[in-house]
Image (tube, grey):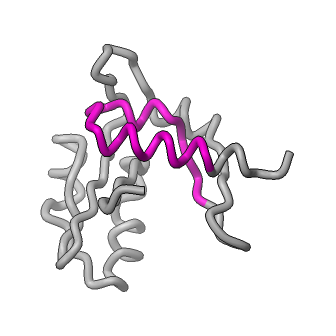
Amino acid sequence: MTRDYDFWIHPDDIAVFNAAASGFDLSPNRSPDEARSVGRYLLENDERVDVLVARTVFTVDSIRVAFDEVWERRQRIAVSPGVHVAIPAFLTKRFAARPKDAEDIRMLEVLRSQEPT
């Protein structure tokens, strides 16, 4: 996986998410209201965490992706024994279409293919 962190959370969950992140000494660069108005913000210390809070986003190839719809269809992928990651949709990795996003998709597909059926 690439070495950055990306989260897409519901706009109503910003305060709860920030409280959880504060335990890792991560600080938001915007207030919850500012984040809602621009649709994203950062949590920062020596790490950088991108947090998307827009209800709807378009991929680089103009596919509309709505948070509520992808969250309803999310998949849980085991990354180690007892540890699961909720993947809302692989489309979310197509928002920017960067090479690192393509590598993330490849790695997530590998993890998903190793899941017991």
- Determine which quarter of the picture holds residue 45: bottom left
Q: Residue at x 36, y 29 (%)?
A: 56
Check the picture and name the quadrant holding the C terminus. top right
Secondary structure, magenta segment, majority class: helix
Q: Residue at x 55, y 47 (%)?
A: 108
Position above or below: 20 against 23 = above
Q: Residue at x 18, y 78 (%)?
A: 46
> Horizontal and vertical percent for residue 97?
29, 31
Q: Residue at x 63, y 37 (%)?
A: 72
- Determine which quarter of the picture holds residue 29: bottom left
Furthest-top residue in this view: 62
> Is 88 one of the magenta-colored residues?
yes
Position above or below: 23 against 10 = below
> Horizontal and vertical percent for residue 59?
33, 24
Furthest-right residue in this view: 117
Check the picture and name the quadrant holding the N terminus. bottom left
Viewer-side residue, 12 vs 68:
68
> Is 111 one of the magenta-colored residues?
no
> Horizontal and vertical percent for residue 2?
35, 56
Position above or below: 60 against 104 = above
Question: Left or right: where does residue 38 sit relative to residue 49?
Answer: left
Q: Give the residues drawn in magenta, as a range.
A: 85-110
Viewer-side residue, 3 vs 66:
3
User: How many numbered badges does the structure rendering display?
Assistant: 0
Viewer-side residue, 63 vs 21:
63
Position above or below: 110 against 31 = above
- Determine which quarter of the picture holds residue 16: bottom left
> Horizontal and vertical percent for residue 78?
68, 60
Question: Left or right: where does residue 67 sit relative to residue 62?
Answer: right
